[in-house]
Amino acid sequence: MDAIKTWLDRSGLASIAILAVLLLVVFPLAMDGFRLNLVGKYLSYGFVAIGLVMLWGYGGVLSLGQGVFFGLGGYAMAMFLKLEASDPQSTAIQSTPGIPDFMDWNQLTALPLWWEPFNSFGFTLLAVVAVPVLLAFVISYAMFKRRVGGVYFAIITQAVALILTVLIIGQQGYTGGVNGMTDLRTLLGWDIRSDEAKTALYFVTAALLLASVLLCRWIQLSKLGTLLLAMRDKEDRVRFSGYDVSMFKVFAFCLAAALSAIGGAMFTLQVGFMSPTLIGIVPSIEMVIFAAVGGRMSLVGAVYGALLVNFGKTYFSETFPDLWLFLMAALFIGVVMAFPNGLAGLYESHVKPWLARRRRGAAADAGGPPAGMPAPHQVPATAAPAASATQPGIGIGTKVSSQSA
């Protein structure tokens, strides 16, 4: 049993199992449909947070533009949903039936060619991941091959987020502009606005998030994860060992982009719209805060960070509508100052030692030795004379039992 506990602790599966029980059992039983849908929306940001753990925590690369990939994944899904909602019967009152309403308002008379593939759900699922990953590859390959990193790379990702936001708002006839894509109703004929659909989408989001955490944990435990850590701490040493450091960074950036895009697609399905306000610089910085609050080295902590920060936004805006921004700022500053390593660091520095002391105390009360110490009868008999010679009058059994107390 102790060996199993040790293996679960080292592999991180124990914390993942607790998270799974919380998401799949506790929340659905304890919350009504409205609150559960809110948690599902929060979990969609969890994909971005765990991607940042892999990119920033393990790879040492800070990106302030993850909202770009979140938005691209969300817009890809929104395009399919918008086309399904824009059939000729539903848009019969438009000047040009069969195209999205914002295109008709901007006097387009035909569906653009690059919209046509999004009539296919299979192509949409591919585009949700492929388009953000392709953009991430182009950006990261161009930057990392030239050894551009650190604060310069963070500023470049911010610039990309700003450019994409301006582009989406400016091309209103093709993207919906500042209003985004709204009135998304069905997925393959299935009404995603119903309570049953929202509950089902919550479980799909939770399952995909747990699968993503397991995938990232597997990468962390592999040789690739070791190299990412080594690259973060001693990049030159890894490079001189013969590894292409730039391609490791490209991989981490593309992985984070793919995870963010999946989160964006699930956000669109659960909320029913996608807007450029979710892509810009401010949302991207908030996504970094999710990982920082949870702990940038902890996958499970990043999920908890996304839940805590978004819950705080909802609670403070509902309870203190005039002060909620100040309260959120106080929450961020307080957590960062009090717990520099996030919630995961709090667990490692306080909760884990407390649990260890509890176990040692329970072992002592039961009359056995503390965890990690041999029982008195397990001490080799050959050691008894030596101990008696050095400490006359004190036997081995007496010495060990006094340490146990």
Image (cartoon, rainbow, N blue to C red):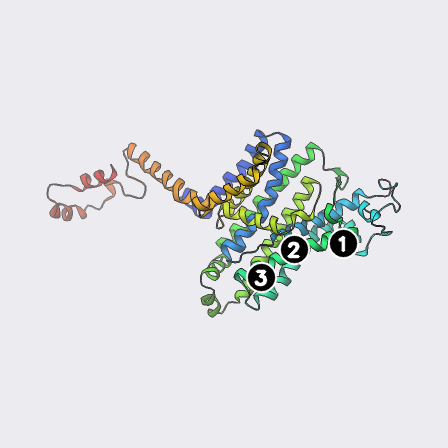
> Where is residue 260 shown, x and y percent of the image?
61, 50
Q: Where is residue 59 in the image (x, y as percent from the top left)?
A: 51, 58
Tag 3: Cα neighbours inside 10 Å, few (<14), some, or many (≥20)? Answer: many
Residue 336 position within the rendered picture, expressed as x and y whole percent measured from the top left: 47, 46
- The three-letter amino acid code for the residue at tag 1 is Gln
Sequence-earlier tag: 3 or 1: 1
Q: Is mark 3 on a helix, strand or loop?
A: helix
Whether residue 180 can be seen here: no
* Residue occupying image coordinates x 42% and y 42%: 5
Q: In front: 361, or 343?
A: 343
Give the amino acid at mark 2: Leu
Q: Can I make out residue 238 in this image?
A: yes
The residue wearing badge 3 is 250
Q: In which quarter of the image is the N terminus?
A: top left
- Please give the residue where the numbered disc 1 appears in the rendered image: 171
Q: What residue type is labelled 3?
A: Val
Give the numbered dot on residue 162: 2
Q: Are marks 1 and 2 in contact (CB under 8 Å)?
A: no
Of circles 3 and 1, which is in front? 1
Q: Confirm or deny contact between disc 2 and disc 3 (CB under 8 A).
A: no
Q: Residue 345 carries which label?
A: none
